Amino acid sequence: MEKVQKEILAKAKKLGYITFDQFHRELMRDKKFRDVWEAGAAERAIRSAIIRKRIEKKLSQAQVAKKAKMHQSAIARFESSDISPTLETASRILAAVGAKVHIS
């Protein structure tokens, strides 16, 4: 599979496309963007930990929503980062997937 990926990337490069990593590195050169990106690091870490825990426990979004007394669509919005959840909402979802957050 790695060979196919390299071939696709080579074709894309010839067409003038760049990878997400290249695009992200370019954006990170801008101090304003970098400040905003770094400010959201904790939220992204919590979000990805919750998604990993849900998948690890083989729970559907609907199952998590039921345990958290929320709608499945709210879990989907949370996971897709369409919203910035309140601490209460994040806590309910964390409890529903059986995860804990340690801040240091």
Image (spheres, rainbow, N blue to C red):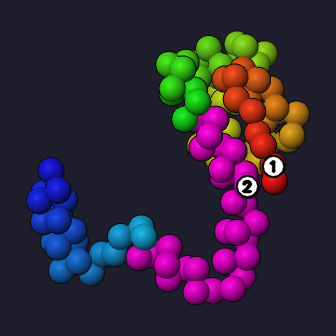
Where residue 30 sits, quadrant-wise, is: bottom right
Q: Which residue is mark 1?
A: 103
Residue at image x 69%, y 22%? 98
Residue at image x 70%, y 13%? 66
Q: Nearer the viewer, residue 71 or 29?
A: 29
Element type where label 1 sits in the image: loop
Sort mark 1 into few (<14), some (14-19) or many (20+) by Cα contacts within 10 Å.
few
Q: Which residue is mark 2?
A: 42
Point out the tag, 1 or 2, that comes first from the N-terminus.
2
Measured as percent of width and height from the top left, residue 47 is found at 66, 43
Farthest residue in the front direction?
104
Measured as percent of width and height from the top left, residue 69 is found at 78, 16
Is residue 97 shown left or right of residue 56? right
Q: Nearer the viewer, residue 101 or 1?
A: 101
Sort mark 2 into few (<14), some (14-19) or many (20+) by Cα contacts within 10 Å.
few
Where residue 16 sits, quadrant-wise, is: bottom left
Measured as percent of width and height from the top left, residue 96 is found at 72, 20
Q: Is 96 covered by the magenta stretch? A: no
Measured as percent of width and height from the top left, residue 36 is found at 73, 71
Q: Amino acid at mark 1?
A: Ile
Element type where label 2 sits in the image: helix
- Specify start and end residues of the magenta stretch as a single range: 22-51
Determine if residue 77 is in view: no
Give the main secondary structure, helix, strand or loop, of the magenta stretch: helix
Q: Amino acid at mark 2?
A: Ala
